[in-house]
């Protein structure tokens, strides 16, 4: 067995040292009738060549790569420069534990410090943590954070927040003393209904969580939302499920929101069938002591040289135990380092231009789809790289099957999550789409409508 | 600072009387046990507290300790200085490292505190 | 003189570029976004060339200790070798390019991977069903405690209390709290295991569950586990097993056979997926039959060819986006396929043999507070030493060895918790023992030298007090400092 360096002779000499005849003797505390199960249902080992063959077969039984995809909704297909794959695959980044010994972990620690800095630059916030699991759990942590900080029992959530994120929030709070209420959207703009928000906010409200661009791809009025929440001394948290939008839109901090959290998969992580991704959280400085998860800080060593450590760890589970800000321990550190590599490689100009290409391609699709009969943009303005189309003369599922027969994955039917939008389809276009591919989608749609 | 004027709790808080107001903090012994204090979470002026309530939090790098109200009453002042200079607690726990001032609601509670001799005996 | 590379932001010069991407020309379109919603630039965001990026991260990588570079006996973290072939497999485009909302008939390979992994985890643990959603161990704990709470609520009363032994991981109390429980700590007995009579003293109708790490954080198998399970079940309570230390039991014993109702595993420990410097992990949760109806969506049905189930009437609800950390699952399955049936037991046996060899060799030098038989790890105390546990840990860095876990579990004074794992050679174990002997000799002759270690690392001891008192959590442009 190539992962086991001990030889039989080694094992024998070690047993002699221990004064035992059989290694099995070390397991004598385990009730005998349950010791050494046969495990007959598990197949025997595969050699490395057979293992690769087996996984190539499994890979080949996926058929998605024969299709032109327009799927988004919280997971986005973006270009990843090859240097990112090479650098992040280094064993020195991939195989350490959490950096508990800073003297031999400065590589990961400085990389995360740089990650925290870039996240604050993109969001316009003061501080960032070192990562959370994903966008959905980051939204749940944001909710818990606002509740802790405000000491108010009631948190509002926008209907246009990603439905999976809302499900996760519901799971997280089901056993805690927190009330969550949904604020509905304006069906004509796809944005939060500000009148309804105003009417729902009160002195018991600790905060409001909304997503922008929201689940329907629409950019929310963050400034107006922040003002409304502040008028009752509540906080506002902007969730960003498509981090690429941060390089196109005015940073949430400039709108006055208190907290930004979400999903940064778009920064250098592959789609990967949904994970591992990268939850992020950035806030105003006043939340520092309430922030969940690890944080890296700058300091000096005994020779006064710049260095980095995990800091403010008293917030965390291993010290505060049941009074910790979160139970999170292992997070997504490698994903954060990889996303830092991506952001650094793209650099200022790259990130801005890729973000613009996302929007330009989507705007081109919008221009073209409006020329087709029996289909319209459900929310005609203020989108980034995702739009909702309403189909008037066909069932959405029929249109999707038709597109699939043209080797196109045409989007996500909204009836999965919103029965009232049964005639709608969510379509994502990124920098990866060629003009000809957008034309192909338009032509295939036009062929049926 | 005349240490003889201080009274102590078994949870290592001290109290000094200024009229009907109790100035309080953590003992020299407690700061020594805790090590370098890096952060103090102060109570809010105006809050009412009961004896034994956790009213503040003192953090070192690797530990966090609750500070309990030695007497019941209303918080009338907190030591803002500690927000930027938590090390005051290490330098002068029983003087400039005070944490809060409490307007006493039940003076009888003072009788249950320890004298400095009793406290020294407890920690020895 | 800087020991570390300059920060990206200090190296950055406008006009440099590290990327190259061609977009198709697009005809002028309508303006769809209000100009005041758009940003012009990102202040101080770095600009570097590709070669500078490569050198920056290559130089940073040299400052890290990792499993790939040396011995890493961090107790309870199972820092075993992460096979390279698993990285190749997890990077196959068919896996990395799959969108989680792809129609199921086009991703049967991926669904098959999750199904096979679940089946193998069921076989190894004796549990009846698994959820692969949790992203890490603590996330699995939270999920598991929510499952218990929902099941008990279904039976009429969720109860209030969760019992946790004094040797538990810090995440246990935090997870129980976020599932809505009050935590009550109970003492382990003189030989380091939880005694049934101690449990019974604390058992009443308020107790929802016991969270038990097995083998526990002393490396000792909780040998009364069957009796504990029976006592809990008779009281209508459940047994949660923290399976962080499953490396000792894989192929040796199945928690499901021992009466465990729910457990979590750490794919990034036992199942050889890389820790990534603190994640991504994966913390699958396995359950007995009575908890299966409450699992979070999506649930992968056992039949070939079927899609995941999203509508589960009694579910605790979704706890993670999409399917969980899929590419971590791919690596774990590849590992299990490489081991096969008999490899499981070989792994556990060598892990336990290695740990016991270290115990045997170091017992002459260090105080062993619990004499009980230990499995995959061993915990020594600092009793009688001229320097602290921290000092020894820091001095080990000078020998090129990552220290063991220190000051945990809390029930051992100055704990040194050593877990070598099965992927270390006898030569490495002997080098470690020799290093420990030399350090203890140094400590006798020149304690101050040891107290000031390390000397040979990229940086020496860091000022954690300053970091916490005056937090600097991001780079700032110089003129604003």
Image (cartoon, coloured by chain):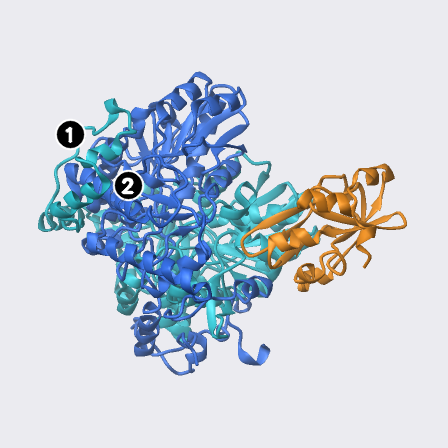
Chain B colour in the picture: orange
- When the figure is inspected, residue C20 is found, relative to residue A146, above or below; the finding is below
Position of residue C402 measured from the top left corner of the image (x, y, whole percent): 34, 58
Judging depth in this view, the residue of B60 and A396 nearest the camera is B60
Give the CA distance from mark 1 to mark 2: 19 Å
Using the rendered image of the protein, determine whether residue C150 is visible from the camera's viewpoint: yes
Query: How would you rate the neighbour count of disc 2 (Cα within 10 Å): few for under 14, some for 14-19, many for 20 or more?
Result: many
Q: Secondary structure at mark 1?
A: loop
Chain drawn cyan in the picture: A
Position of residue A408 measured from the top left corner of the image (x, y, whole percent): 25, 52
Residue placed at 20% from the left, 52% from the top? C426
Which residue is outermost to the right? B19
Chain C colour in the picture: blue
Q: Which mark is residue C456?
A: none
Position of residue B47 measured from the top left corner of the image (x, y, whole percent): 77, 46
Left or right: C394 in relation to C89: right
Can you tell which of label 1 and label 2 is closer to the viewer?
2
Which residue is outermost to the front? C445
Q: Which mark is residue A40?
A: 1
- When the figure is inspected, residue C161 is found, relative to residue B82, above or below; the finding is above
Judging depth in this view, the residue of A367 and C203 nearest the camera is C203
Disc 1 with disc 2 on a shared chain: no
Q: Secondary structure at mark 2?
A: helix
| Residue C145 figure quarter | top left
Q: Which mark is residue C247?
A: 2
- When the figure is inspected, residue A29 is found, relative to residue B18, above or below; the finding is above
Residue placed at 46% from the left, 49% from the top? C414
- When the figure is inspected, residue A21 is found, relative to residue C391, above or below; the finding is above
Residue placed at 23% from the left, 41% from the top? A18
Using the rendered image of the protein, determine whether residue B47 is visible from the camera's viewpoint: no
Confirm or deny contact between disc 1 and disc 2 (CB under 8 A).
Answer: no
């Amino acid at each position: 067995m190539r992962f086991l360096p001990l030889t039989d002779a080694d094992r024998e000499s070690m047993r002699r040292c221990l004064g035992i005849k059989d290694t099995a003797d070390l397991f004598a505390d385990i009730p005998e009738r349950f010791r050494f199960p046969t495990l007959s249902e598990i197949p025997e080992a595969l050699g490395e060549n057979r293992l690769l063959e087996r996984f190539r077969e499994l890979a080949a039984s996926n058929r998605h790569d024969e299709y032109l995809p327009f799927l988004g909704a919280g997971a986005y297909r973006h270009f990843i420069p090859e240097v990112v794959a090479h650098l992040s695959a280094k064993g020195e980044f991939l195989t350490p534990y959490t950096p508990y010994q800073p003297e031999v972990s400065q590589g990961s620690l400085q990389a995360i410090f740089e990650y925290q800095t870039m996240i604050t630059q993109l969001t316009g916030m003061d501080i960032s943590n070192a990562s959370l699991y994903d966008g959905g759990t980051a939204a749940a942590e944001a909710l818990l954070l606002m509740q802790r900080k405000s000491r108010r029992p009631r948190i509002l959530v926008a209907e246009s927040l990603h439905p999976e994120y809302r499900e996760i929030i519901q799971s997280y709070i089901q056993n805690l003393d927190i009330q969550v209420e949904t604020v509905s959207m304006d069906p004509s703009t796809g944005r939060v209904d500000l009148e309804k928000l105003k009417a729902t906010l009160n002195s018991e409200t600790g905060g409001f969580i909304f997503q922008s661009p929201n689940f329907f791809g629409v950019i929310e009025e963050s400034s107006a939302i922040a003002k409304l929440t502040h008028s009752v001394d509540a906080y506002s948290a902007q969730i960003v499920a498509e981090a690429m939008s941060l390089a196109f839109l005015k940073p949430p901090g400039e709108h006055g929101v208190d907290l930004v959290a979400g999903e940064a998969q778009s920064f250098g992580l592959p789609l990967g069938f949904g994970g591992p991704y990268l939850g992020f959280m950035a806030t105003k400085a006043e939340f520092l002591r309430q922030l969940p998860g690890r944080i890296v800080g700058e300091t000096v060593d005994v020779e006064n040289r710049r260095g980095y450590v995990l800091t403010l760890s008293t917030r965390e589970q291993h010290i505060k135990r049941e009074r910790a800000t979160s139970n999170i321990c292992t997070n997504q550190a490698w994903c954060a380092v990889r996303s830092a590599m991506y952001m650094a490689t793209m650099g200022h100009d790259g990130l801005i231009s890729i973000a613009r290409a996302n929007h330009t391609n989507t705007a081109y699709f919008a221009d073209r789809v409006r020329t087709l009969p029996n289909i319209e943009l459900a929310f005609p303005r203020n989108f980034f790289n995702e739009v909702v189309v309403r189909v008037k003369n066909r069932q959405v599922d029929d249109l999707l099957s038709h597109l699939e027969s043209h080797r196109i994955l045409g989007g996500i039917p909204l009836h999965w999550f919103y029965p009232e939008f049964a005639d709608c389809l969510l379509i994502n276009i990124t920098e990866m789409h060629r003009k000809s591919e957008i034309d192909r989608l338009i032509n295939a749609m036009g062929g049926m409508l | 600072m005349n240490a003889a004027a201080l009274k102590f709790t078994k949870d290592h808080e001290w109290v000094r009387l200024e009229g009907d107001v109790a100035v309080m903090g953590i003992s020299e012994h407690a700061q020594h046990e805790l090590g370098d204090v890096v952060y103090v979470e102060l109570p809010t002026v105006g809050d009412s507290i009961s004896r034994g309530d956790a009213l503040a939090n003192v953090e070192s790098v690797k530990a966090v300790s609750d500070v309990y109200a030695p007497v019941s009453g209303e918080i009338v002042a907190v030591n803002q200085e500690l927000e930027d200079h938590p090390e005051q607690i290490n330098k002068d726990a029983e003087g400039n490292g005070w944490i809060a001032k409490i307007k006493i609601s039940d003076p009888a509670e003072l009788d249950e505190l320890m004298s400095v001799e009793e406290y020294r005996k407890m920690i020895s | 003189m800087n020991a570390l590379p300059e920060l990206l932001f200090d190296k950055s010069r406008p006009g440099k570029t590290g990327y190259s991407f061609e977009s198709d020309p697009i005809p002028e379109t309508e303006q769809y976004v209000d100009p005041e919603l758009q940003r012009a630039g990102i202040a101080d965001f770095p600009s570097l060339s590709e070669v500078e990026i490569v050198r920056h991260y290559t130089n940073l990588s040299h400052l890290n200790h990792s499993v790939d570079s040396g011995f890493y006996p961090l107790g309870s973290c199972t820092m075993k070798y992460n096979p390279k072939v698993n990285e190749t497999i997890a990077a196959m485009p068919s896996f990395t390019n799959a969108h989680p909302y792809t129609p199921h008939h086009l991703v049967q390979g991926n669904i098959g991977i999750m199904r096979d992994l679940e089946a193998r985890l069921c076989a190894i643990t004796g549990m009846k069903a698994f959820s692969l959603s949790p992203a890490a161990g603590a996330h699995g704990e939270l999920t598991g405690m929510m499952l218990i709470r929902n099941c008990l609520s279904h039976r009429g009363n969720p109860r209030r209390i969760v019992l946790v032994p004094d040797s538990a991981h810090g995440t246990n109390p935090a997870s129980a709290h976020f599932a809505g429980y009050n935590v009550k700590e109970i003492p382990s007995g003189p030989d380091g295991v939880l005694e049934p009579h101690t449990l019974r003293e604390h058992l009443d109708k308020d107790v929802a569950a016991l969270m038990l790490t097995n083998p526990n954080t002393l490396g000792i198998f909780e040998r009364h586990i069957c009796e504990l399970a029976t006592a809990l079940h008779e009281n209508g309570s459940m047994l949660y097993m923290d399976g962080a230390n499953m490396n000792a039991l894989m192929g040796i014993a199945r928690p499901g056979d021992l009466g465990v109702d729910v457990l979590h595993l750490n794919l990034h420990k036992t199942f050889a997926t890389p820790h990534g410097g603190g994640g991504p992990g994966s913390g699958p949760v396995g359950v007995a039959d009575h908890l299966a109806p409450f699992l979070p969506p999506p649930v992968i049905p056992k039949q070939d060819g079927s899609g995941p189930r999203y509508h589960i009437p009694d579910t605790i609800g979704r706890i993670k986006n999409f399917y969980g950390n899929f590419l971590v699952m791919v690596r774990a399955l590849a590992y299990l396929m490489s081991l096969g049936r008999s490899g499981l037991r070989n792994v556990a046996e060598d892990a336990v043999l290695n740990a016991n060899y270290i115990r045997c060799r170091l017992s002459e030098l260090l105080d062993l507070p619990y004499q009980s038989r230990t499995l995959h790890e061993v915990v020594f105390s600092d009793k009688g030493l001229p320097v602290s546990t921290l000092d020894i840990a820091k001095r080990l860095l000078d020998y090129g060895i990552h220290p063991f876990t220190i000051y945990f579990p809390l029930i051992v004074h100055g704990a040194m918790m050593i877990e070598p794992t099965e992927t270390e050679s006898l030569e490495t174990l002997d080098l470690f023992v020799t290093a420990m002997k030399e350090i203890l000799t140094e400590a006798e002759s020149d304690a101050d030298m040891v107290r000031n270690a390390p000397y040979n690392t990229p940086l020496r001891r860091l000022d954690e007090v300053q970091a916490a008192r005056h937090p600097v959590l991001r780079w700032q442009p110089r003129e604003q400092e």
